[in-house]
Image (tube, rainbow, N blue to C red):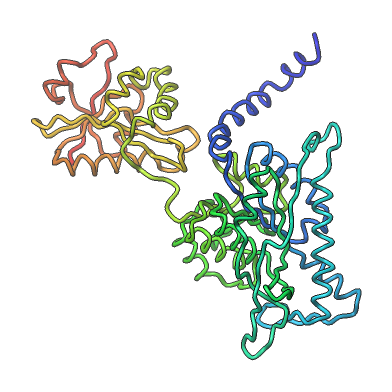
Amino acid sequence: MNSKTESKRRHPTRNQEFVNWFRSAAPYIHAFGGRTFVIAFGGEVVSEGDFVRLAHDINLLNALDVRVVLVHGARPQIEAELKERGVAMKYAGGLRITDAEALACVKEAAGSVRVEIEALLSMGLPNSPMAGADIRVASGNFVTAQPMGVREGVDLQHTGEVRKIDAVAIKRRLDQNEIVLLSPVGYSPTGEVFNLTLEDVATAAAIALKAEKLIFLMETPGVTDRKGKLLKELTTQQAEQVLRGMKDATSDVSLYLPCAIKACRNGVGRAHLISRHVDGAIIQELFTREGVGTMITQEPVEQFRQATIDDVGGILALIEPLETEGILVRRSRELLEMEIDRFYVLDHDGIIIGCAALYPFPEEKAAELACLAVHPDYRDAGRGTLILAKMEDIARRKKLKRLFVLTTRTAHWFVEHGFAEAGVDALPHQKQALYNYQRRSKVFVKRL
């Protein structure tokens, strides 16, 4: 027995899990190619040695044709420089007062971090995730800044804010398959240098580039509710409600969540808040259905809508396993294409995770609810109940009075949702003529 066969026999589950994950990641891989991601992280990621792992994930994204813009912070490095030079740390309203001495420390720290990141992205060690990477990094004066000026009577001096991002120049570098690296430093048209915050630079860059994603790596897993439960998906409106209820105004969430909201409301497709402490957090967040952090969107990620011909493949993938088990009646692709106007789907971020069909019998003010299915990964969150409620609303809008189903396996579920068992004679006459007595489906009816 060779080592490969022996390994497969020892780890069949692990192998299958990998295959299943890789297949489930395929839609995301297709969707992300050619899109721009802005990834922001604090200087701690570099100072604590975590950037090596992050570099592996950036390499993977680059290999998948994702256009990557990195925005780094330098707070711990700046503070280390200030301490070494004996320069006092001055703050006002949570903002650093950057005088001439502090600015010298900012320049030194930001330059040091940038060089270290470039060096780590240049790794190409054999037998490592960076083997053959050949990553080219571009950095420069892409950020035009202006002074924050006097805030609450305090002159912040060389502390500034983003005035403009040179999106054209950045896109030119991205077009050449380079990764763009932005530091928290900006320049004025008069040649002045300003100390910026990484979140300001990242948000402005994401908006200017019309990025698909803005990703913040932070200390906590993401946004949590009052009980500490991770909130995996939030609309901008829901995120604002979370902010209003927050007590800790100094947390990472209070810092990054407003930026995520601003970005999504200004054309960025998605914003993600994820932990910097989780190995492979970016890959898990982007390429798995459940993710590991919090995703913010302008509109709800899930939409219930009428199916189109483009949804046929997704519907078939959903119902074919149930047809094989005998739970649903088999439908060919041709039949599904002909009847697609009868179908409705639950769309989760571009992936069909649920469906149902409605076949009206107007003369008898009744309709058959058919092909109700939910993807296995989403069955424990009430999606089936949601689809049923939506289908009932559609039937009511069509002035129908009764909804009926034929089922062989899910009788209890329909009873729990208000259906009552009935005989075949309760079906519309046209449906009675088509009833399959060999299948012996049970009939359940619900009055609307």
Left or right? Give the position of 144 relative to 261.
right
Tell me the residue at 41%/33% (across/down): 374
Residue at the outermost top position:
1
Percent across and percent down for residue 272 are: 58, 53
Residue 314 in the image: state x and y as whole percent. Answer: 43, 29
Q: Is residue 148 left or right of residue 354?
A: right
Residue 13 vs residue 66, the one in the foreground: 66
State which quadrant residue 229 falls in.
Answer: bottom right
Residue 179 in the figure: left or right of residue 32: right
Q: Position of residue 186 (x, y in %)?
A: 70, 69
* Quadrant of the rendering where the C terminus is positioned: top left
Name of the residue lying farthest toward the front: 190
Q: How many marks?
A: 0
| 408 or 288: nearer the viewer | 288
Q: Is residue 70 above or below residue 188?
A: above
Residue farthest along the bottom direction in this orientation: 153
Q: Residue at x 81, y 34 (%)?
A: 131
Q: Is residue 7 above or below residue 115?
A: above
Q: Which sits in the foreground, 41 or 329?
A: 41
